[in-house]
Every structure is written in structure tokens, then in C-alpha cells.
Amino acid sequence: MIMNRIILFVAISLLLVGCSSSKKINRAPLTENNASLITKQMNDNALSFNTFKAKFSVHVKMNDSEMDLHGQVRMKNDSIIWMNLTKAGLEVYRFMITKDSVFVINRIGKQYAIDPVSSLSKIINSRIDFSILQGLFTGNDFYGYDTEDFSSSVDQRLYRLSAINREKIITEEITAESAVSIPSHTLWLNPETFRIEKSEIRDASEGLDRTLTVKYDNFKKENEMLIPHIIDVDLSGEVGFNMHIELTKVSVDESLNFPFSVSSKYQRVSWR
């Protein structure tokens, strides 16, 4: 059961990370007083895609435990995130995330779950929604969140954007009650490509200090896009957790399917 919980935790964390790309290079002056310009260049150079697919290997450390897993991730922009995890060549988990729901198949326990996306926040004990998941996975900023309060600086030759209490922009689809706010968000950008090389979310609410840090490295050009093939994730707080991820066979805008069928012999449970 402990191994199952670790693998589930890895799966959720993997949904928070991924790849990024660069469409063009427009270098801005390396100064501290141009947050709006840096933000615009970041958005102009964000990954634009309809579908995304990649295979990955991941080495995980969680407290005193370590393991190696493999898997595949598929995405449809602003719609679906699909992922499976394998160990020793056998699938152990399959996930599908939509804007409002999370679907899970546990092959080891012969169980499945269908829960609201908000249940992910409880599993990792941090605030999350579909926009944050997809943003971290693509290396983009979080779609639909306010950018007016970003402050800028230069940190070790990278642009640094930071904001406190980033609010979700209220729309017909997003109500004030359902909107997720980000207590503290910091981004470090390459000054030539304006791609995010590091993203950090910090939540010190409820007497706890939790920080999720994602670093992107080893960028390679594929299909005219710069994609990081090494990703390091660190989640600090109650649980010491980090992952080293290597991506292979990355493709963008291919025709994809998102298979998710559950055996009638599996028991429905809740991860909330």
C-alpha cells in the first residue's frame, strides 16, 4: 500500500510539470523596470499547440524511498491531460484530467476513481486547477490568471517575474467561489527566448510553508520548437519529494486519442 501511495503521489506531481517551446526571439533590455514588456514577450513566445505527446522516464525520491518509472503523457490544449505510468513494463496507473474532473485507474489495486479536479489539491496539499496543471506542464504561464501585478527584476542574468496572491480572472465559466488564487508565484525567464526556466509556487497559509519548484533544462529544437528534455521538480513542506524527469519522442499537433475504459471488475473509490 505504501508503494501504491508513492506511485499515486508521483503521478499527481508529474501532472504539474512538462515541456516548453520558443516561437521567436525578441530580446528586451535586461533591466528591472519593464514587467509589462517581459510579460508580453513571455506570452508571445508561449507554446502554442493543439495536441502534445511525449514519453518520459522519471527517478523519484520521497523521504527514504526511491524508484524509477516510465510513462507517456498526452494533452489536448485547454481540454484534456492524459497520462499513464509503468513499472517493469506494466501499467500501474492511468490518469485523465479535464477542466472539472480527474479520472484514475489503479491497475495494482483494481480500482478506479472519478473525482472533481479540486481533489488534486487535497492529495498534494497545495492549490491547483486545470490552468495551473497545463501551465506547469507546458512551461507556459497560467492561462486566465491576472498579470497586472507582476513585478520584475534581474536575478543571475535571468528575468524574474513575481506576484503575490495572483487571482483568477472571473468570467462566465469561472466564478468567484470556484476561482483558485496563488499565494506567491515567481518565474525566471531566459532573456533571449523568454521561455520559463524555473517556476516556483509558494503557499505559507494554514501555518505551513509549502513550495513547488520546477526547473527546465537541456533545451532541444524539435519541430521548430525549443523543448526541455530534462525537468527537475522539488516539493518541500510536510513531505520531502523530488523528481528527475527525462523526455523522449516529443511530438506536437499529431492526431491523438485518449483511451480510458474501466473493467467492470474494478471497484470505484474516491481519492478525496
Image (cartoon, helix red, strand yellow):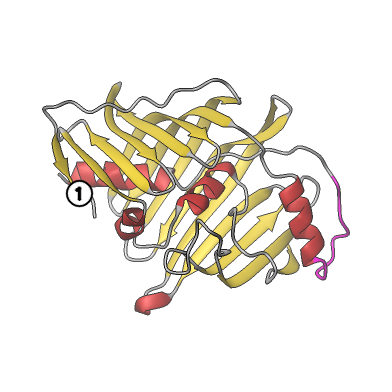
Q: Which residue is mark 1?
A: 270
Residue 12, percent from left and from top: 36, 46
Which residue is nearer to you in this view: 271 or 217? Answer: 271
Residue 271, percent from left and from top: 23, 50
The outermost residue toward the front is 172
Span highlighted in magenta in the image? 26-34
Q: Please identify the quadrant where the C terminus is shown.
A: bottom left
**Residue at point 42%, 68% (across, down):** 177
Which residue is nearer to you in this view: 109 or 253? Answer: 253
**Residue at point 70%, 63% (across, down):** 160
Q: Please identify the quadrant where the N terminus is shown.
A: top left
Left/right placement of residue 258 relative to residue 248 reads left
* Residue 16 sits above or below residue 53 on the image: below
Residue 223, percent from left and from top: 69, 24
Inspect this view and state whether residue 115 appears.
Answer: yes
Residue 66, percent from left and from top: 31, 43
Inspect this view and state whether residue 190 appears.
Answer: no
Q: Amino acid at mark 1?
A: Ser
Q: Residues within 10 Å of mark 1 (few under 14, many from 20)?
A: few
Q: Which element is circle 1 on? A: loop
Instruction: State the image quarter where residue 38 is shown.
Output: bottom right
Magenta residue check for 27: yes
